[in-house]
Amino acid sequence: MTMLPNKPEPTAVGAVSSAVAGHVTGPAWLSSSLGIVRIFMKNVPQLIGACLMLVLTGCQKPSDVIGKAEATIKSAALASITAKYPDVSSSELKFSQMSIRTTPSGQEEIFVTYDLPSSAKTTTEGKKTTTTTKTISVRVSLSGKAESVYESTKSDTYNTTQ
């Protein structure tokens, strides 16, 4: 006669409870995935609230401000230029650059510059050619209000071969 290892025999109750427990928990990956989904779903309202708060409070990068409102800012700058210099037509101006600068007080402002190509003067001295062009710049607040309009010149120097 062969002796079996000393194991208790399964009873009907033990077999059923083991089968039910195995069926309810399922594979470990499923229960852990469901746990992650429950945590995520529980926190969705907070995540949505955080995103909305960023939009509503205006917390955005200055570069986003320029990207979204570039056409409006350019139009406001052109209107300010033609108001201050009525003899300059907006069709004579060529867009040059737009940038955001921070003032010493920490306030950010947008600067828009247009060139006036018809004012360009070229000089050559030795192997260098310089073109000087009149520019008109506008300082605009982040809200889009033109604060000041001023003119200056810009010079581009190139080395030439003779």
Image (spheres, rainbow, N blue to C red):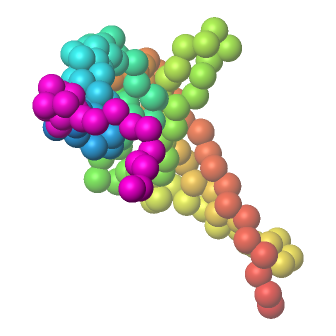
Which quadrant of the structure image shows residue 88? top left
Q: How many marks?
A: 0
Q: Quadrant of the C terminus?
A: bottom right
Relative to residue 123, is residue 12 depicted above or below? above
- In the picture as drawn, the residue positioned furthest to the bottom comes out as 162
Q: Quadrant of the N terminus?
A: bottom left
Which of the pair 146/99 is nearer the observer? 99
Measuring 41% from the left and 48% from the top, which residue is drawn there?
A: 4
The residue that appears at 58% across and 28% down in the rendered structure is 101
* Position in image of residue 7 (x %, y %): 39, 37
Quadrant location of residue 146?
top left
Image side of residue 133 versus residue 123, left or right:
left
The front one of 104 and 115 is 104
Give percent across and percent down for residue 95.
41, 51
Place residue 158 in its image quadrant.
bottom right
Q: Residue at x 34, y 33 (%)?
A: 8
Residue 128 percent coordinates (x, y): 80, 72
The boundaries of the magenta stretch are 1-21
Q: Is residue 95 left or right of residue 102?
A: left
Query: Can residue 12 be found in the magenta stretch?
Result: yes
Residue 76 in view (yes/no)? no
Q: Residue furthest right?
A: 126
Q: Give the vertical position of 80 relative to 118 (above or below).
A: above
Q: In x, y percent, where is residue 5? A: 45, 45
The vertical placement of 146 against 12, above or below, is: above
